[in-house]
Image (cartoon, rainbow, N blue to C red):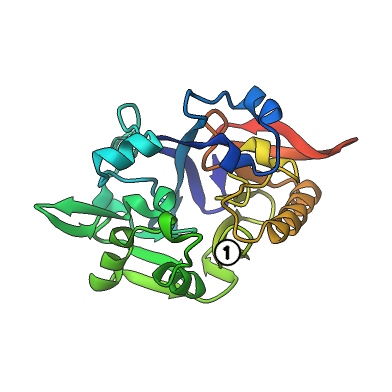
Amino acid sequence: MRVGHYDVFSIETGRFALDGGAMFGVVPRVLWAKAHPPDEENRIALASRAMLLVGEERKILVDVGNGDKYSDKLRSIYKIDASRFNIVASLRQHGLTPADITDVILTHLHFDHAGGSTELVDGTLHPTFPRATYYVQRDHWQAATHPTDRDRASFFADDFLPLKEHGVLQLTDGEGELMPQVRLKLVHGHTTALQCPVISDGTKTIFYCADLMPTTSHVQLPWIMAYDLRPLVTLEEKRSVLQEAVEQNWMLFFEHDPSVAAVTVKQTGKGIGVDTPIEV
C-alpha cells in the first residue's frame, strides 16, 4: 500500500496470548469467545504486528513486538511464539536488516509493543536497531519509569532503559507532525500519553490503533480492555477516532488482531462497525 511519500507494510513479529477476560473487560465471555476462542487457560491468540514505512529516505518502524529476551516462565505465561513470525525474518522479506531502520516510533512501552527494542548480545543489552532513533512521549517515559502498582507488570525496564543509555532515545512532546506526512495523536485511556501515528497525504489516511483498539472486535465502543487505566477516557477517545475515521474514510491498522491487519469502518444501525478489510 502507498500512502503519500511512504510504502506501508504490515510486519509480523510473532504471536502471543493474553487472558480473554482482561482483553474485553466487562464484555461477557459468551460474547467475546465467539470471535476469539480461548484456550484451556482462558487466553486468546493475539498478533504482535508492527508497521513499516519506507520513503523520504527513511525506513520507519511503528512498534516492535515482544522481542526475544524472555525467561521460560514468561514465555509460558504469555504463550510467546516466534516460530512462525519474527521481526528480523519479516524485515528480510522486504530486503531490510535491523541496521537499515532509521526510526522507531514506540506507541508506548508495554512489553508487547516495545520488547523488541533491545536485544541481548553476549549477555549485554543493546538497541536492536542500532542506527535508529527511538521516539517515546516524554509524559509516557515518566509513567513507564515510575509505574503504579496497577501497571508495573506491563513495563520491563530492559526494553527501554538501554535506549537512553545508548543515546538513541528522543522524547516527544505532545501531538503534531513528527516527520513528513506522519503526525502523532495522543490518547490517555489505556496508559498515559500513548502516541498513535497517523500517516496521511490528505487523500489517504491510515491510523495506527495500538491499544486504543487492539483488535477489530474493539471497534465496538463498550469493548474496552481491563488493562486500561482509564476506561471511560478510552470510551470517549474511541468514539472520537471512529467518528473521524468514518467522516474521512480512514483506514485503521490493528496491532493485535490475529487475522486482520487493517479495515475501513462505516456507520451502521447499531453504531460504527467494521466495513472492508484492507491488504497491507
Mark 1, other Cα within 10 Å: few <14 / some 14–19 / many ≥20: some
Q: Is residue 83 above or below residue 162?
A: above
Q: In percent of the image, x 33 and y 50: which residue is there?
A: 116
SS at circle 1: strand
The amino acid sitting under disc 1 is Arg
Left or right of residue 24, residue 269 in this image: right
In the rendered image, residue 188, in percent from the top left (x then y), is placed at: 62, 64
For the N terminus, the quadrant is: top right
Q: Is residue 28 above or below residue 70?
A: above
Q: Nearer the viewer, residue 72 or 254?
A: 72
Residue 142 sits in quarter: bottom left
Q: Would residue 80 be seen by someone viewing this image from the given angle?
A: no
Residue 158 sits in quarter: bottom left
Q: In percent of the image, x 73 and y 54: which residue is there?
A: 235
Q: Nearer the viewer, residue 29 or 1?
A: 29
Task: Count the labels in the image.
Answer: 1
